[in-house]
Image (tube, rainbow, N blue to C red):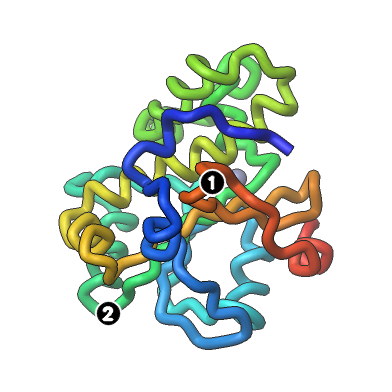
Amino acid sequence: MIKLKPGVQRGLGRTTEDAERLNGPIPYGGYKNALFLSCCESNAVPLLLQRKYWRCNHMVQNPGNLVPPSGTPGAVGAEIERAYEAGVRDFVVCGHHPCTVVQALVAPEASPPSGPSMAAWLAQAAETTRVVAASYAGLDPQARLEAAAQVHVLAQLQNLLTYPALAAGVEDGTVALHGWVANTALGQLLHYDPAEGQFMPWLRTVMKVSSR
Ligand SMILES: [Zn+2]
């Protein structure tokens, strides 16, 4: 499994206390008031989690599970702000591997944007492209794409911190951010552990059922 280099984890916590704040207890089998953001390509995973493990009441899907920075016009930021206002305090960004949008971000020569709207959309995720080029260029294409899926989720968590209410909530411990990657190549759902600075295996059985 890919091990991330330090860098994109900045500001997402490094201690056990941070881990509990940023990646709080998993409500396995229970109700949770949460916003779940995932890629359009991977709807089986959130739907299964919604029904069986994590009953989210705010679902957002877009190409590549992007979180545009606060103040960017569009539905994603509006729903983040609306969910917070409605009482949501857990925000999950669920990436997946392999993802064609992440592929387009890290290897645009092989997977060019499908049109001008997609090119403009992808430009909002330039941080993923930058970090992968700077730190993971030496990996083989498959490993680089696996690392990119994880880097990309952490970059989106960084963007969640640009929302003032969420940043303040993380600071005082009332808001938790969760980074997940559904790795269908490994057959596992990984979650980001801030204390380790790495994604760790979490649910295997879910992926066995939901991968497609
Ligand atoms: Zn995808």
Q: Which residue is mark 2?
A: 87
The quadrant holding residue 112 is top right
The quadrant holding residue 168 is bottom left
Residue type at the position of mark 1: Glu
Residue at point 69%, 18% (across, down): 139
Quarter of the picture containing the N terminus is top right
Dot 2 surroundings within 10 Å: few (below 14), some, or many (20 or more)?
few
Front tag of 2 and 1: 1
- Quadrant hosting ligand 1: top right
Residue at point 33%, 56% (across, down): 76
Q: Which residue is mark 1?
A: 196
SS under mark 2? loop
Distance Cα–Cα, label 2 vs label 1: 29 Å
Residue 163, x across and y down, in percent? 21, 53
Residue 39 visible at all: no
Residue at point 56%, 40% (across, down): 150
Residue nearest the viewer, comparing 171 with 144: 171
Dot 1 surroundings within 10 Å: few (below 14), some, or many (20 or more)?
few
Choose the circle earlier in sequence order: 2 or 1.
2
Question: Does 150 sit above or below residue 27?
Answer: above
Q: How many marks?
A: 2
Residue type at the position of mark 2: Gly
